[in-house]
Amino acid sequence: MQPEYVSIHSRAGRACSRLLSAVLLLVALPVLAGQQSPQPGAELERLAREGGLPPEELGRRIAQAAWDRDRGFGDFSARITLYLRRPDGRVVTRKLRTWTLETPSGDKSISVFDAPADVKRFARLTWAHEDGQDDQWLYIPKHNRVKRLSHANDASPFMGTEYANEDLGSQRPEEVGSFTYRFLRLDRCGPQEQARDLTCFVVERRPVNPYSGYSKQVVWIDTRAFRLWRVDYYDRKGKLLKTQWFNRYQQFRDRYWRPMDMLMVNHRTGNSTRVIWSDYRFGNGFSERDFTPENLLHVR
């Protein structure tokens, strides 16, 4: 007998009607930024220009400052449209909702696919942990069951996109977190219109996760607001595999910056995935009860 599907909104209230990503995203997905005092960026830029700190310590401080800038948001939600483009020009479009809750032990997030029909109601839950590897679950509607994802699958692609499962986990910089760091140089942030006049810290980060599909990542973080503009991903053999670009940043609540347009390009296959964000909402009133594996059975 199929269980009755009850919307998460009935528990979180009408204010939860639109939701945000894992990421992700992606999401969950990793998000850096916020607007506070400019002093941390100015001081770190001075240290980068003048030296005086080992590259590993300076890289860690930059990552920690970027992380700290985004804390305190509570919860947020959004809608996402994915465009999966193949080298022959064929494009597959997917739509999902996603939402995130900030907790003392690490962020929790859920993403739910709405379209097309072959992925509708697939849902993903991620628990980020401050003191260890993330936990992830996937709801498979065809079998009406929730599957816990093994860390051995961290390098696998997520739902046919150019994002690996590990790309959607936490990017926390703590010593026991996701990466070790090393400052490389200062550089222009990129060709994006918003980034042309900005200077970026270029930092190498190496995954701690033994199941990671990457040997390292190189990230561009601006010195002004600690926004992430570019990430280069290198495979286990040290070859450039993918590049992710961030664009069209918008500021919310006079503090939190979010990229509305993200592009992941696979240099090996020619495939790409574009992520368009919309309908950001903060202060939805989510609770930890909404982010359990059991609740994936009832999310719609």
Image (tube, rainbow, N blue to C red):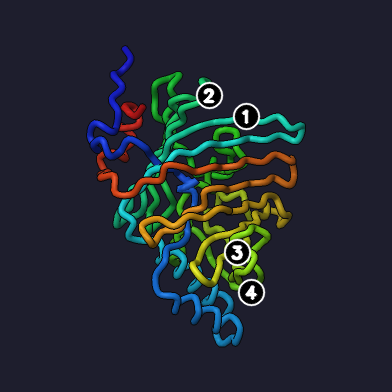
Q: Which residue is mark 3?
A: 220
Picture layout, residue 56 above or below residue 221: below
Callout 3 touching callout 1 (CB < 8 Å): no
Any mark on residue 155, and which?
none
SS at mark 3 in the image: strand
Q: Give coordinates of residue 143: x percent, y percent.
A: 43, 19
Callout 4 touching callout 2 (CB < 8 Å): no
Q: Is residue 242 left or right of residue 278?
A: right
Picture layout, residue 177 above or below residue 78: below
Amino acid identity at mark 2: Pro
Any mark on residue 92, and which?
1
Q: Which residue is mark 2?
A: 116
Indicate which disc, 4 or 2, sits on the residue closer to the N terminus. 2
SS at mark 2 in the image: loop
Determine the CA span between mark 4 and mark 2: 43 Å
Q: Is residue 292 left or right of residue 53?
A: left
Residue 46 visible in image:
yes
Tag 3: Cα neighbours inside 10 Å, few (<14), some, or many (≥20)? many
Query: Which quadrant of the structure image shows residue 221?
Result: bottom right
Indicate which disc, 2 or 1, sits on the residue closer to the N terminus. 1
Indicate which disc, 2 or 3, sits on the residue closer to the N terminus. 2
Farthest right residue in view:
88
Indicate which disc, 4 or 1, sits on the residue closer to the N terminus. 1
Amino acid identity at mark 4: Leu
The residue drawn where x is 50% and y is 46% is 26
Q: Which residue is mark 4?
A: 186
Indicate which disc, 3 or 1, sits on the residue closer to the N terminus. 1
Determine the CA span between mark 2 and mark 3: 34 Å
Q: Is residue 215 left or right of residue 158?
A: right
Q: Give coordinates of residue 194: x percent, y percent.
A: 59, 60
